[in-house]
Amino acid sequence: MLPPKKTVIEDTEENRQICRKYCTICPNYKTHHLEKFSPTELFCAQGPSSCTDKKEIRCFCFGCEVFLKNHLRLGYFCTRG
């Protein structure tokens, strides 16, 4: 049996604008100052932050419009990719 295909999120300005509404207020993002590390947003499309000192606190991915419209799972994209 083949593993399920990973959903590919488009790295578009529209998705980035949606993402900014959630990431910038997320406890993980704020506590770890993820705006200082690459990538700075849209982790579901770009992968986890390069910040090496990340402890998962709370996740706002589950309410994000990008998360919902793409039927994503799990969350914590800034720490897990």
Image (cartoon, helix red, strand yellow):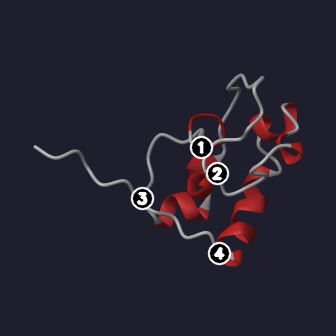
Which residue is label 2 attached to? 43
Q: Badge 1: how crowded within 10 Å, few (<14), some, or many (20+)? A: many
- Residue 70 in picture, x, y percent from top left: 45, 64
- Residue 49 in picture, x, y percent from top left: 71, 41
Q: Are marks 2 and 1 in contact (CB under 8 Å)?
A: yes
* Residue located at (67% from left, 26% from top): 56
- Circle on res. 67: none
Which residue is label 1 attached to? 77
The quadrant of the rendering that contains the N terminus is top left
Give SS at disc 4: loop
- Residue 69 in picture, x, y percent from top left: 48, 67
Q: Earlier in the sequence, mark 2 or mark 3?
A: 2
Residue 42, image quadrant: bottom right
Which residue is label 3 attached to? 71
Instruction: Give the alpha-carbon distance from disc 2 to disc 3, as whole Å.
Output: 15 Å
Which kind of residue does numbered mark 3 sit on? His
Q: Are marks 4 and 2 in contact (CB under 8 Å)?
A: no
Give SS at disc 1: helix
Instruction: Give the alpha-carbon distance from disc 4 to disc 1, as whole Å.
Output: 17 Å
* Residue located at (88% from left, 38% from top): 33
Question: In the picture provided, is 27 more to the left or to the right than 73?
Answer: right
Q: Is residue 24 above or below residue 14?
A: above
Q: Earlier in the sequence, mark 4 or mark 2?
A: 4
Instruction: Give the alpha-carbon distance from disc 4 to disc 3, as whole Å.
Output: 17 Å
Which kind of residue does numbered mark 1 sit on? Phe
Q: Badge 4: how crowded within 10 Å, few (<14), some, or many (20+)? A: few
Q: Earlier in the sequence, mark 4 or mark 3?
A: 4
